[in-house]
Image (cartoon, rainbow, N blue to C red):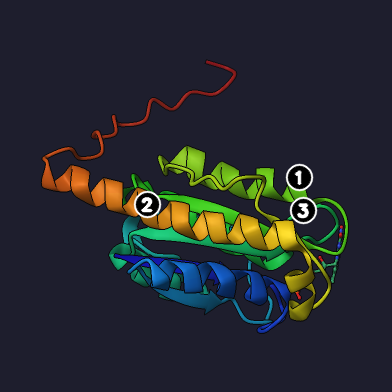
């Protein structure tokens, strides 16, 4: 079983990385393979809405989104983490997730996911709500912790002082390992994720 942990910060080893490292260690202690994937600090394009991905099976813009998409096929679970920027997720992870998830529910459906956000002070729940929406639209069970998944600080070392934040991260790691184990046990017993119906796509005009 493998979990991919996305660092959506422009800082490779900042607060977001520190938070993901805590979850990663707990996953590994519980027998789950874990890899942190950094989006880098170069600009990431948003979705152009060209629809080419429907034919190509990947994004027409060939960058970290396609690299991650390939890794996602083999992964069993996901953690997407972001610093809070203006009470929202970072611009990079927003562009990344828009392009990653568009039309790709076959890859993500049934695989558990969770978000983690890091902030100096505020905007955490708004950023979490934003990130969590990708999972609910993609049929991904959302992994809980014991509070909303947030830690506070401005650099990696700060989060160790956020005792409740550290506890939230440890619980999240254990709960992700538990849910992956349940899904695996279910598969062994012949219980698989229900087939998704073809989408009935309406708008507000008809
Ligand atoms: C452009 C920008 C906007 C930010 N907006 C907020 C904010 O709305 N609320 C907040 O508490 N911190 C805000 N911060 C601070 C970061 O969320 C905080 O320092 C975080 O720990 C950085 O994580 P990182 O080291 O992984 O990048 C902002 C930082 C930047 C660079």
Kindly tell me whether residue 99 is visible in this rendering: no
Residue hosting label 3: 88
Residue hosting label 2: 178
Separation (CA) of disc 2 from disc 1: 27 Å
- Note whether ligand 1 is within 8 Å of mark 2: no
Vertical arrangement, residue 71 with respect to residue 136, above or below: below
Q: Secondary structure at mark 1?
A: helix
Rendered residue at 79%/70% (across/down)? 161
Q: Which mark is first along the chain, 1 or 2?
A: 1
Residue hosting label 1: 126
Q: How many marks?
A: 3
Q: Which mark is first along the chain, 3 or 1?
A: 3
Separation (CA) of disc 3 from disc 2: 29 Å
Q: Residue furthest top?
A: 206
Asked whether, in this view, residue 155 is left or right of residue 104, the answer is right
How crowded is the residue under tag 1: few (<14 C-alpha within 10 Å), some, or many (20+)? some
Separation (CA) of disc 1 from disc 3: 6 Å
Residues at marks 1 and 3 touching, judged by CB atoms closer than 8 Å: yes
Q: Position of residue 159 (x, y in %)?
A: 75, 70
Rendered residue at 49%/74% (across/down)? 25
Q: Secondary structure at mark 3?
A: loop
Nearer to the camera, 101 or 87: 87
Asked whether, in this view, residue 94 is left or right of residue 180, the answer is right
Q: Which mark is first along the chain, 2 or 3?
A: 3
């Amino acid at each position: 079983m493998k979990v991919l942990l996305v660092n959506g910060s422009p800082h490779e080893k900042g607060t977001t990385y520190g938070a993901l490292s805590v979850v990663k260690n707990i996953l590994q202690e519980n027998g789950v393979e874990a890899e942190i994937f950094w989006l880098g600090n170069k600009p990431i394009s948003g979705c152009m809405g060209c629809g080419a991905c429907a034919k190509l099976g990947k994004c027409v813009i060939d960058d970290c989104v396609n690299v991650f998409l390939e890794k996602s096929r083999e992964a069993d679970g996901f953690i997407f983490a972001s610093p809070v920027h203006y009470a929202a997720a970072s611009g990079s992870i927003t562009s990344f997730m828009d392009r990653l998830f568009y039309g790709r529910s076959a890859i993500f459906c049934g695989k558990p996911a969770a978000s983690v956000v890091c902030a100096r002070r505020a905007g955490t729940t708004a950023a979490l709500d934003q990130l969590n929406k990708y999972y609910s639209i993609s049929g991904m069970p959302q992994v809980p912790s014991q509070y909303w998944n947030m830690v506070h600080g401005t650099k990696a070392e700060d989060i160790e002082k956020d005792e409740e934040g550290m506890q939230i991260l440890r619980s999240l790691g254990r709960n992700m390992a538990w849910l992956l184990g349940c899904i695996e046990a279910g598969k062994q017993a012949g219980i698989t994720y229900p087939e998704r119906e073809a989408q009935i796509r309406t708008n507000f005009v008809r």
